[in-house]
Image (cartoon, helix red, strand yellow):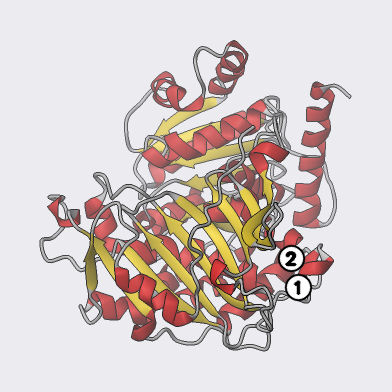
C-alpha cells in the first residue's frame, strides 16, 4: 500500500469516527474549520501551528476539506501571519517539506479583531462561512474547532463571542468545539468560576481542557503497560511497591518569564496539573472499557482518595538569583522548586508515598516516573546496599522504560551488581517519529475523543487537593528555601525523600544506549 493511499484511508476513518462519536451515525460530512485565537502569540507560533502543519504533512488534515483561521488583535495581512509562523514550521532547506509548507500556508487566513466585541467575531464567522460555502457543505454539517491560545482571563469573553457569533446554525452532524489551555484558574474558587462561565455557554462534550503531558508517548503508554501485561498486575500495589516518584526537572530558570511565573509558582505551573495527571494514570484502577468517560471516572476516584497535604511533607525552594529578575518582587516567596508527598487512602495504595517533585535551575533536565519496589526479604546475597529494584519510565528526553535489577557480575567471583532491562525508544524504534503531544491532542479533538483531556469534576478535585497548601504559601506560612542553581535543589528535599522511605542508588547511572 502506497503512502498516499494510507493517508486517504486515515482521513476517511478520522472523519467517520468523529461523526459516530458525536451523533451515533455517519451522515454526509462537512468541511473542517480550525480557528486559532491568539494567532500572533508565542504559543500559537511555537506549538499550535507546528502541530497543525505536522498533521497536514502526514495526511490527517485534508486540504480539500480543511481551512485554518488565525484571529488576534494585532493588525496583520494573511501573508504577514504566514511569514511570522513560517520559520517555526520547517527547515527551509528541506525541499520536500518546503512544498508541503507552501500548500499548508495557503490554507491560512487571518482575521483581526478584539476579544470582547461581536464585530470581530462576526467577521471571523463570515470568513468561516465563506469557506464552508466554497466546499459545498450543507448548513449545520460543517465542523468548527476553536483553539484558545490565549490567557485564561479572556476565556469568558471569547467563549461568549464564539457562542453568540460563530456556532453552527443547525445540527446535521456537524459540531463546534473549543480547546482551552492551562492554567485553569489559580485555586479552587477561580477554577470553579471559570468552569461555570464556560459551562453556561458550552456542554462538557464541547470543551477540551488540554494538558499536553497527556499527549506524551510514554504517558499514553501507561494504561497499556499496566493493564495489558500480566506480570505487572500482582506487583502494582502496596504489598510490593515502597514508593512512587513523579519528577520534573529543568536545568534553566524562568529566563525572562519571571513576572508571569511569580504569579503562579512551580506547584500551579507543573505539579497540580502535569504531575497530578501522571499520578492518576499510575494509581487508577482498571476502567471497565477504553471509553473516555470510563477512564476519566477512574482518574476522579483516585483524586478523591488523596488525603490532605501536611506541611511536614512539603519542601519548597527558590533558586538564588530568581529575585534578580526586575519583574519579580524583592520579597517573593514563590517557589521555583517543590517536593510534596501525596497519600492515597484506598486498598491498593494505603501507606505508599507518591512523591511529586518539580524544579527549575537544577542540575539536569528530565521528566520521569520512578517506581521503587520493597526490599527482598531474606537477603542471602547481602546486596541490599546496592539498591532496590526500580521501574523507571523516562518521559523526556530520550524516551525509555527500564527496570533496575540485581544480577551476577560477570566473572569467576559470586558478586552482584545493579544493571537494567532497557527499552529505549531511540534504539528500539529507529526511524519512527514520535509525534509531539499537541499533534495527538488536536487530532483527538477533531475525532471527538476526550480521553486525554481534563473533565470538569476532575479539575475541581485536583484544585481541592492543592488549594489549602497554595493559600498557606501565598500567606507566607510555608517558606521557600534558597538553593544554588545547578544543584539538586534544597538538601531538605532529599531528607524528606529519605524520611518517606526512598532509598537512593549510589554508584549506578542509567546511560541511554547509543545507536
Dot 1 alpha-carbon crowd within 10 angstroms: few under 14, some 14 to 19, many 20 or more: some
Q: Residue at x 29, y 50 (%)?
A: 253
In the rendered picture of this protein, how many numbered marks are placed on residues? 2
Q: Residue at x 63, y 67 (%)?
A: 389
In the image, residue 507 above or below residue 443: below
Drawn side of residue 336 relative to residue 32, left or right: left
Residue 226 on image: x %, y %: 74, 65
Question: Badge 2 is on which residue?
Answer: 226
Residue 286, labelled with which disc? 1
Element under disc 1? loop
Find the distance from the CA under tag 2 to the CA under tag 1. Answer: 9 Å
Comparing marks 2 and 1, which lies closer to the viewer?
2
Note whether residue 188 is visible: no
Tell which of 372 and 20 is nearer to you: 372
Q: In this image, 147 relative to 469: left or right?
A: right
Residue 416 appearing in the image: yes
Mark 2: which secondary structure? Answer: helix
**Mark 2 Cα shell of 10 Å, populated few (<14), some (14-19), many (≥20):** some
Left or right of 498: which side holds 246? right
Query: Residue 68's spot in the image, x, y percent?
Result: 55, 32
Q: Say whether marks 2 and 1 touch (CB < 8 Å).
A: yes
Q: Earlier in the sequence, mark 2 or mark 1?
A: 2
Question: To which quarter of the image does residue 345 belong?
Answer: bottom right
Q: Residue at x 36, y 54 (%)?
A: 154
Q: Position of residue 290 (x, y in %)?
A: 78, 63
Observer-nearest residue: 172 or 246?
Answer: 246
Query: In this rendering, is residue 249 above or below 46?
Result: below
Q: Quadrant of residue 494?
A: bottom left
Quarter that holds the N terminus: top right
Instruction: Tell me if residue 54 comes above or below residue 29 in the rendering.
Output: above
Percent x, y of residue 453: 60, 59
For the residue pair 135 and 97, the one nearer the viewer reads as 97
Amino acid at each position: 500500500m502506497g503512502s498516499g493511499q494510507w493517508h486517504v484511508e486515515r482521513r476517511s476513518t478520522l472523519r467517520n469516527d468523529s461523526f459516530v462519536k458525536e451523533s451515533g451515525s455517519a451522515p454526509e460530512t462537512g468541511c473542517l474549520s480550525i480557528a486559532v485565537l491568539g494567532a500572533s502569540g508565542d504559543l500559537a507560533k511555537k506549538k499550535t501551528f507546528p502541530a497543525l502543519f505536522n498533521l497536514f504533512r502526514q495526511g490527517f488534515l485534508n486540504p480539500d476539506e480543511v481551512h485554518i483561521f488565525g484571529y488576534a488583535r494585532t493588525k496583520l495581512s494573511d501573508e504577514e501571519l504566514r511569514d511570522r509562523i513560517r520559520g517555526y514550521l520547517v527547515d527551509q532547506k528541506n525541499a520536500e517539506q518546503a512544498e508541503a509548507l507552501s500548500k499548508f500556508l495557503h490554507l491560512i487566513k487571518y482575521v483581526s479583531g478584539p476579544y470582547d466585541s461581536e464585530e470581530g467575531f462576526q467577521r471571523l464567522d463570515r470568513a468561516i462561512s465563506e469557506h464552508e460555502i466554497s466546499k459545498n457543505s450543507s448548513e449545520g454539517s460543517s465542523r468548527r474547532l476553536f483553539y484558545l491560545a490565549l490567557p485564561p482571563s479572556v476565556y469568558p469573553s471569547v467563549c461568549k463571542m464564539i457562542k453568540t457569533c460563530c456556532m453552527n446554525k443547525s445540527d446535521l452532524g456537524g459540531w463546534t468545539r473549543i480547546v482551552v489551555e492551562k492554567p485553569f484558574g489559580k485555586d479552587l474558587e477561580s477554577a470553579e468560576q471559570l468552569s461555570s462561565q464556560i459551562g453556561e455557554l458550552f456542554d462538557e462534550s464541547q470543551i477540551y481542557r488540554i494538558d499536553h503531558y497527556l499527549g506524551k508517548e510514554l504517558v499514553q503508554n501507561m494504561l497499556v503497560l499496566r493493564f495489558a501485561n500480566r506480570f505487572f498486575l500482582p506487583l502494582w500495589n502496596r504489598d510490593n511497591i515502597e514508593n512512587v516518584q513523579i519528577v520534573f526537572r529543568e536545568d534553566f530558570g524562568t529566563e525572562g518569564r519571571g513576572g508571569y511565573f511569580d504569579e503562579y509558582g512551580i506547584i500551579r505551573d507543573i505539579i497540580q496539573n502535569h504531575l497530578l495527571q501522571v499520578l492518576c494514570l499510575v494509581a487508577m484502577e482498571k476502567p471497565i472499557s477504553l471509553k473516555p468517560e470510563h477512564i476519566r471516572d477512574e482518574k476522579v476516584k483516585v483524586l478523591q482518595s488523596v488525603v490532605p497535604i501536611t506541611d511536614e511533607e512539603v519542601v519548597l525552594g527558590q533558586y538564588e538569583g530568581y529575585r534578580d529578575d526586575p519583574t519579580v518582587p524583592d520579597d517573593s516567596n514563590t517557589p521555583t522548586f517543590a517536593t510534596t508527598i501525596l497519600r492515597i487512602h484506598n486498598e491498593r495504595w494505603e501507606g505508599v508515598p507518591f512523591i511529586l517533585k518539580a524544579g527549575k535551575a537544577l542540575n539536569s533536565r528530565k521528566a520521569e516516573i520512578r517506581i521503587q519496589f520493597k526490599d527482598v526479604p531474606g537477603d542471602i546475597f547481602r546486596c541490599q546496599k546496592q539498591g532496590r529494584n526500580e521501574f523507571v519510565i523516562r518521559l523526556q528526553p530520550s524516551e525509555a522504560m527500564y527496570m533496575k535489577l540485581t544480577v551476577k557480575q560477570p566473572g569467576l567471583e559470586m558478586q552482584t551488581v545493579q544493571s537494567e532491562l532497557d527499552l529505549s525508544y531511540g534504539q528500539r524504534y529507529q526511524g519512527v517519529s514520535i509525534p509531539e503531544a499537541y499533534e495527538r491532542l488536536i487530532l483527538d479533538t477533531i475525532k471527538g475523543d476526550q480521553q486525554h483531556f481534563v473533565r470538569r469534576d476532575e479539575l475541581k478535585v485536583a484544585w481541592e487537593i492543592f488549594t489549602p497548601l497554595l493559600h498557606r504559601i501565598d500567606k507566607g506560612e510555608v517558606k521557600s528555601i534558597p538553593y544554588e542553581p545547578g544543584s539538586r535543589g534544597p538538601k531538605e528535599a532529599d531528607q524528606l525523600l529519605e524520611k518517606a522511605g526512598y532509598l537512593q542508588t549510589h554508584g549506578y547511572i542509567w546511560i541511554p544506549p547509543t545507536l
